Image: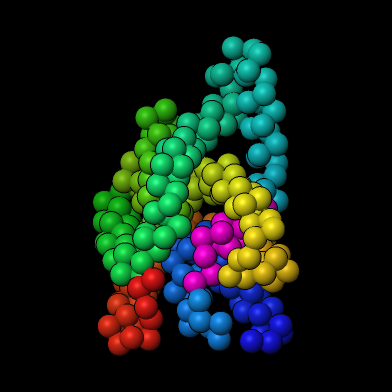
């Protein structure tokens, strides 16, 4: 395969990563599905997925830079000044820390399965369809009245557990946290906003860990094309954040529910026809 094709594939995968990371449709599932359909015909791998997510999280850091800076300062003050724990920004920062613990612990415990057996496309298709149903129920029955200022420690941990489910391709990091938020009565915009912020520590830690592990080793996609995909994911991801937050402030999540069901069904059809292999 020519070098030009490798770079073109990487750019395409970067676009896919940027388009799907923040939507409740699972970016890891899309990369897992599209990779084998490209000329190279292989799974891009968990490492490539994690590294390109550095690009989309950089977009989050840029978009929410003022909120993040404010929370970081308040959190730092709270370490030495107990009274600062009541500060809303410090409290939100601590909630993000607590919410990150489940995915960190489960990610370490099930690291081998996450990088191998859980990437089975039958599992991916099943998760796309099953969590579409859960998201549909949550969007319909959720009261959508709570704001982030009303979040307690228990809800922060539940958000974290929901995020941890995204270790399985097909669940979706944003989909899991948004669904949990809706079921707990948060508004669509509040659930989406917190989903973006909660993902920052876990995604960056995973991405840089996989980047470190890949140094000096042969990977399915070379370092140069991976860097290009990460850059493309950053640019596309920033635009998606802007549009998605505007969308969910006035629209339901049902279009994403339908999309997940259709995509999951197509993947199953491709698997049964032999166009895709499970692993």
What residue appears at the point 51 percent right and 60 percent down from the top-left corner? 46
Residue at 39% across, 67% down: 256
Q: What scheme was used to colour the molecule?
A: rainbow
- Foreground pick, 256 / 248: 256
Is residue 54 found inside the magenta-colored segment of the image?
Answer: yes
Image quarter hosting the N terminus:
bottom right
Image side of residue 74 versus residue 261, left or right: right
Q: Which residue is drawn at the image coordinates 41% and 42% (left, top)?
A: 109
Q: Is residue 15 visible?
A: no
Q: Is residue 175 left or right of residue 233?
A: left
Quarter holding residue 265: bottom left
Residue 117, visible in the rendered structure? yes
| Above/below status of 49 relative to 107 | below
Percent of width and height locating residue 268: 30, 77
* Magenta stretch, residue numbers: 43-60
Q: Is residue 114 above or below residue 37?
A: above
Residue 34 coordinates in the image, percent (x, y): 49, 77
Which residue is most to the front? 217
Give the image quarter of residue 269.
bottom left
Looking at the image, residue 168 lies above or below residue 262: above
User: So how many labels did they put on this image?
Assistant: 0
User: In the image, is residue 52 part of the stretch drawn in magenta?
Assistant: yes
Residue 239 % position (x, y): 64, 64
Q: Looking at the figure, which quarter contains the C terminus? A: bottom left
Residue 32 in the image: state x and y as whole percent: 46, 70
Instruction: Identify the main secondary structure in magenta.
Output: helix
Quarter residue 147 falls in: top left
Which residue appears at 69% of the width and 78% of the height? 7
Q: Is residue 4 left or right of residue 270?
A: right
């Amino acid at each position: 395969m020519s070098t030009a094709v490798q770079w073109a594939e990487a750019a395409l995968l970067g676009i896919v990563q940027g388009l799907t990371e923040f939507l409740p449709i699972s970016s890891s599932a899309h990369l897992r599905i599209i990779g084998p359909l490209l000329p190279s015909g292989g799974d891009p791998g968990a490492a490539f997925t994690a590294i390109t997510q550095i690009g989309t999280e950089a977009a989050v850091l840029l978009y929410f830079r003022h909120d993040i800076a404010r929370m970081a300062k308040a959190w730092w003050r709270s370490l030495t000044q107990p009274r600062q724990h009541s500060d809303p920004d410090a409290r939100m920062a601590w909630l993000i820390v607590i919410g990150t613990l489940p995915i960190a612990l489960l990610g370490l415990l099930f690291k081998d399965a996450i990088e191998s057996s859980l990437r089975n496309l039958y599992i991916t298709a099943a998760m796309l369809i099953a969590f579409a149903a859960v998201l549909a129920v949550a969007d319909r029955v959720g009261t959508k009245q709570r704001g982030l200022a009303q979040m307690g420690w228990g809800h922060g941990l539940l958000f974290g557990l929901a995020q941890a489910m995204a270790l399985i391709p097909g669940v979706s990091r944003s989909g899991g946290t948004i669904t949990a938020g809706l079921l707990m009565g948060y508004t669509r915009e509040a659930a989406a906003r917190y989903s973006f912020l909660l993902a920052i520590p876990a995604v960056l830690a995973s991405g840089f860990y996989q980047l470190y592990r890949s140094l000096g080793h042969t990977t399915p996609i070379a370092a140069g094309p991976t860097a290009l995909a990460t850059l493309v994911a950053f640019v596309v991801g920033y635009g998606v954040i802007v549009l998605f937050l505007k969308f969910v402030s006035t629209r339901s999540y049902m279009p994403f529910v339908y999309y997940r069901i259709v995509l999951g069904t197509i993947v199953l059809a491709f698997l049964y026809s032999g166009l895709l292999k499970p692993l």
